[in-house]
């Protein structure tokens, strides 16, 4: 997630900007930059890479940047690869601008501005926004009016910080669906995308309301509504220390990232739905007739990403009736998979740098098969080398255990399944639109409802702290969910667990069930509810202690013979996996946290596995 800082005051802005950016480093970034307004107008320094590289560049003899007013940015790429030119701040004739968010209609904005004689140097949506505000400024001559007029045109999410050559000492800011705070410190005033960036200077801040422009000057901050009338904002106070603030007030990144799932899904799905409310990938092979030519699909990934592939298999086969294999990437090339010219290989990877996934991609390409990657890190190796890429917009995932990245991978696979089913005539246009609508609007609400069960899930988790072994059972798509539920618990709690298709237990493994063995039964499919209930009876009659995770509908219509039930709020069974996912992720989180483990950095694990 991008980080924004702005400072205007009595001091040189550069150390303040660098300090603010360092405090935002936890958000993850791939490039950084600052712009300062000095005697000779605005100067910008930016670079791909770390803040140390930016500082080195600033200190080099070729570069001179100074001024009492400036803005800075750490970029997490969403449009265009990480590079110097794509880094922020972006410059237009009269201004420099930093942006956090996604501008959906940047293509349209570019076309309009090209007709007015504007040129573009970067691939970013942000440069289009900078030049749009510049265009409005030339017409209206007033920064606040220009910002309001431009944001009437912009669709999407944004937190913007803007400085104008003609208005030295002033920063202008506005936001929609992306965070931005404003603060007054001892030595000057600030804007920032998050509290840690200002904590060294003040603990008081304003959370900027949407539809309000903030004007930040060296000794005061003021706010204006759309009619350019002054308006008030509420002053807030924070008691956090820097570490807690970086985690958004949550004790660990993992639980913070689970809480970010609704937003991650809204962003990812909305970026891939057209104005006709149908999936739109911006890739010829997927949007047109091309997608219906694929006869077999292979999903290849590792760990959690591979488990998302299992969910994708279920949904693609169910909606589109196209066969899907799911392969563990480290096995794929060694089993010499049968790949035909009408096959599609989908690579899933949060980091885009997993060595086994990259090797599987290269293997598929060497066989002449079309490759599509679903990746979270823009410009990563898997993204660059695949024939086409769909980015998940989860923002950086800092906790080693993957949570929100899994949920958005599943969301994109649902969208892919809807597109494929629609192109193959397996579902009507109206059905496709309704499914897209549910994915975009209902799924985030199901997840939000599950997040509200936090206390209940924590209390259930507290009963599992002393076990050494545990089973997850489910059928159909629920057995795919069990694989991820089990991995999540294992990797952070260090409790051994196994995921089993409920019907398979009796073929051997049931001999491990004895008095008190914990079993968690995941039940989202009503058509399989009775079969699952039989499975629960089988383990209970051998003494198992059963916790069921299910939907309201199943809980109301069936008597589940478990000791305990957690019921997730979800009215549409097809999308219940999202609500259940959040539930088992929180369960694993609480077991780990209550056992006193280092939740975000489990032993022996690395976030990105770049060795075979
Ligand atoms: C587990 C986890 C791993 C990753 C796997 C693949 O929580 O995060 O299992 O899913 O190492 O990583 P990516 O998705 O980066 O390819």
Image (cartoon, grey):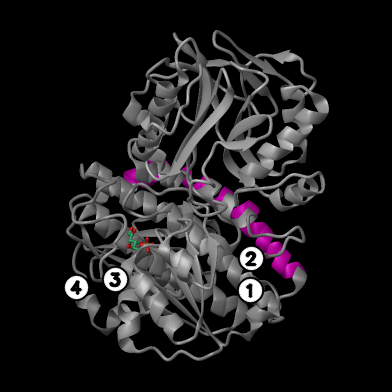
Packing grade of label 2 (10 A; few <14, some 14-19, many >=20) is many
Query: Which residue is the site of mark 1?
Result: 286
Query: Which residue is the site of mark 4?
Result: 512
Mark closest to the chain's N terminus, 1 or 2: 2
Any magenta on residue 434?
yes
Distance from Cα at disc 4 to Cα at disc 3: 10 Å
* Residue 356 locus on image (x, y percent): 32, 71
Distance from Cα at disc 1 to Cα at disc 4: 46 Å
Mark closest to the chain's N terminus, 4 or 2: 2
Can you tell me which quadrant of the image ligand 1 is in? bottom left
Query: Which residue is the site of mark 2?
Result: 281
Mark closest to the chain's N terminus, 4 or 3: 4
Give, as a single range, the part of the protein colored magenta: 430-459
The total number of labels drawn is 4
Distance from Cα at disc 2 to Cα at disc 3: 45 Å
Packing grade of label 3 (10 A; few <14, some 14-19, many >=20) is many
Left or right relative to 392: residue 537: left
Mark closest to the chain's N terminus, 1 or 4: 1
Q: Residue at x 38, y 47 (%)?
A: 457
Tell me the mark number nearer the camera, choosing from 4 and 2. 2
Establish if 229 lies above or below 602: above
* Residue 534 locus on image (x, y percent): 39, 74
Distance from Cα at disc 1 to Cα at disc 2: 7 Å
């Amino acid at each position: 997630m991008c980080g924004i800082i702005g400072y205007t005051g009595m001091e040189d802005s550069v150390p303040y900007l660098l300090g603010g950016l360092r405090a935002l480093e936890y958000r993850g970034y791939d490039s950084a930059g600052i712009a300062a307004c000095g005697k000779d107008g605005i100067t910008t320094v930016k670079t791909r890479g770390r803040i140390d590289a930016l500082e080195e560049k600033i200190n080099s003899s070729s570069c001179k940047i100074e001024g009492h007013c400036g803005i800075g940015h750490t970029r997490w790429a969403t449009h265009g690869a990480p590079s110097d030119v794509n880094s922020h701040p972006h410059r237009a004739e009269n201004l420099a601008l930093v942006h956090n968010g996604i501008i959906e209609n940047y293509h349209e904005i570019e076309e309009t501005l090209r007709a007015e004689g504007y040129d573009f140097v970067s691939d970013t949506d942000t440069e289009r926004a900078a030049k749009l505000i510049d265009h409005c400024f030339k017409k209206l001559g007033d920064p606040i009016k220009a910002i309001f007029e431009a944001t009437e045109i912009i669709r999407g999410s944004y937190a913007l910080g803007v400085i104008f050559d003609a208005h030295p000492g002033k920063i202008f800011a506005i936001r929609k669906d992306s965070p931005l705070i404003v603060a007054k410190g001892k030595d000057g005033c600030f804007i920032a995308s998050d509290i840690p960036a200002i904590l060294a200077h003040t603990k008081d801040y304003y959370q900027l309301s949407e539809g309000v422009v903030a004007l930040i000057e060296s000794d005061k901050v003021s706010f204006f509504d759309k009619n350019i009338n002054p308006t008030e904002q509420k002053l807030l106070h924070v008691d956090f220390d820097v570490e807690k603030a970086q985690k958004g007030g949550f004790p660990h990144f993992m639980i913070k990232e689970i809480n970010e799932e609704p937003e991650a899904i809204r962003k990812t799905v909305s970026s891939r739905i057209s104005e006709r409310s149908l999936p739109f990938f911006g890739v010829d092979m997927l949007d047109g007739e091309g997608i219906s030519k694929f006869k077999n699909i292979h999903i290849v990934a590792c760990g959690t990403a591979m488990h998302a592939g299992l969910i994708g298999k279920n949904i693609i086969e169910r909606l589109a009736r196209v066969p899907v294999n799911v392969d563990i990437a480290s096995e794929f090339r060694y089993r010499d998979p049968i790949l035909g010219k009408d096959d599609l290989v989908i690579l899933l990877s949060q980091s885009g740098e997993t060595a086994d996934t990259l090797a599987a991609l290269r293997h598929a390409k060497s066989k002449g098969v079309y490759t599509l990657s679903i990746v979270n890190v823009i410009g990563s190796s898997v993204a660059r080398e695949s024939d086409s890429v769909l980015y998940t917009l989860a923002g950086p995932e800092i906790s080693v255990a993957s949570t929100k990245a899994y949920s958005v991978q599943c969301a994109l696979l649902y969208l892919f399944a809807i597109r494929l089913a629609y192109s193959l005539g397996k579902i009507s246009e109206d059905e496709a639109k309704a499914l897209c609508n549910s994915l975009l609007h209902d799924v985030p609400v199901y997840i939000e409802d599950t997040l509200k069960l936090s206390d209940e899930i924590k209390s259930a988790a507290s009963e599992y702290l002393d076990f050494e072994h545990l089973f997850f059972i489910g059928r159909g798509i629920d057995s795919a969910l069990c694989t991820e539920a089990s991995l999540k618990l294992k990797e952070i709690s260090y409790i051994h667990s196994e995921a089993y298709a409920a019907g398979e237990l009796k073929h051997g493994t049931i001999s491990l069930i004895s008095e008190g063995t914990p079993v968690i039964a995941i039940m989202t499919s009503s058509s399989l509810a009775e079969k699952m209930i039989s499975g629960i009876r089988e383990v209970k009659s051998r003494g198992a202690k059963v916790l069921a995770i299910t939907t309201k509908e199943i809980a109301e219509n069936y008597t589940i013979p478990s000791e305990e039930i957690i019921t997730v709020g979800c009215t549409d069974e097809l999308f219940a996996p999202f609500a259940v996912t959040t539930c088992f992720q929180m369960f694993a989180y609480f077991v780990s946290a209550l056992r006193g483990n280092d939740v975000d950095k489990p032993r022996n694990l690395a976030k990105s596995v770049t060795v075979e």
